[in-house]
Image (cartoon, grey):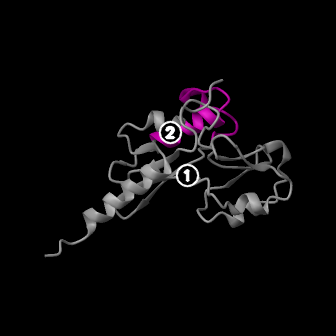
C-alpha cells in the first residue's frame, strides 16, 4: 500500500465551499467503519458505521470538523498506554486500538472535541487523515472541493487571504 503523496499536509476546510451535504461523513463511515464497504450494506449492519469527522452547522455555515493532528497534541501526552501515536512520516496522530484501555482521557483533553468512544472496538476513535492511503476518503468524495490537502504554508496563505477579504478598505 502506498502512502500519501505529500507527507505533512493537512486537511483544510474552505467553509465558503461546504454545502453541508455530509458526503464526507458517509464516505468516511462506509470506507473506514463498515464491514461491507458499501452504503447499502452499511445501513444493515448490526453496529452502524460511524464517521471520523462530523459536519456541524453554525447559523448558515456548515463545516466538517476533524482532527487537527496538533503539533503539541494533548491526546498524545495524556495517553498512558501509548495507544495514541504519531506517524513519523506524515505527522498524523492515530490510535492503536489494541492498546487502548478505554479510559477516555484523550477524549477529555482534545481541544477540538474530535475524539469519540468506539464502544464496539473498546477503544477511542478519531480521524487519522487516512495517512496510510493515497488520500483521505472524505477529500475524494467532497463534491465541491471544500476539503483540501494543504501544507502548513498553504493553509497560512489561504487564511491570510481570507482575513484580507474581510478587512475594510482604508484610504
Q: Which residues are magenta?
A: 23-49
- On-image quarter of the N terminus: top right
Q: Does residue 42 appear anywhere in the picture?
A: yes
Percent of width and height locating residue 51: 59, 44
Question: Residue 164: percent from the left, percent from the top?
Answer: 28, 64
Q: How many discs mark residues in the rendered view?
A: 2
Please check the rendered image and state whether residue 48 is part of the magenta-colored stretch, yes or no. yes
Separation of residues labelled 2 and 1 (CA atoms): 10 Å
What residue is shown at x 42% (from left), y 49% (from top)?
Answer: 154
Residue 73, position as x, y percentages in the image: 67, 60
Q: Tag 2: Cα neighbours inside 10 Å, few (<14), some, or many (≥20)?
A: many
Tell me the residue at 66%/63% (across/down). 110
- Disc on res. 93: none
Decide if residue 43 is in sight here: no
Q: Is residue 28 above or below residue 163?
A: above
Q: Which residue is mark 1?
A: 66
Pointer 2 residue: 138
Q: Secondary structure at mark 2?
A: helix
Q: Secondary structure at mark 1?
A: loop
Residue 105, placed above or below residue 125 = below
Amino acid at each position: 500500500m502506498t502512502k500519501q503523496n505529500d507527507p505533512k499536509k493537512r486537511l483544510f476546510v474552505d467553509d465558503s465551499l461546504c454545502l453541508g451535504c455530509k458526503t464526507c461523513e458517509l464516505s468516511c463511515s462506509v470506507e473506514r467503519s463498515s464491514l461491507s464497504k458499501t452504503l447499502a450494506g452499511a445501513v444493515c449492519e448490526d453496529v452502524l458505521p460511524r464517521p471520523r469527522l462530523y459536519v456541524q452547522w453554525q447559523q448558515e455555515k456548515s463545516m466538517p470538523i476533524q482532527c487537527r493532528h496538533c503539533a503539541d497534541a494533548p491526546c498524545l501526552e495524556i495517553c498512558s498506554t501509548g495507544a495514541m501515536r504519531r506517524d513519523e512520516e506524515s505527522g498524523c496522530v492515530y490510535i492503536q486500538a489494541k492498546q487502548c484501555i478505554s479510559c477516555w482521557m484523550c477524549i477529555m483533553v482534545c481541544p477540538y472535541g474530535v475524539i469519540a468512544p468506539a464502544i464496539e472496538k473498546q477503544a477511542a476513535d478519531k480521524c487519522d487523515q487516512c495517512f496510510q492511503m493515497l488520500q483521505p476518503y472524505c477529500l475524494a468524495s467532497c463534491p465541491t472541493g471544500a476539503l483540501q490537502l494543504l501544507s502548513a504554508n498553504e493553509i497560512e496563505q489561504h487564511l491570510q487571504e481570507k482575513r484580507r477579504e474581510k478587512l475594510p478598505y482604508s484610504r
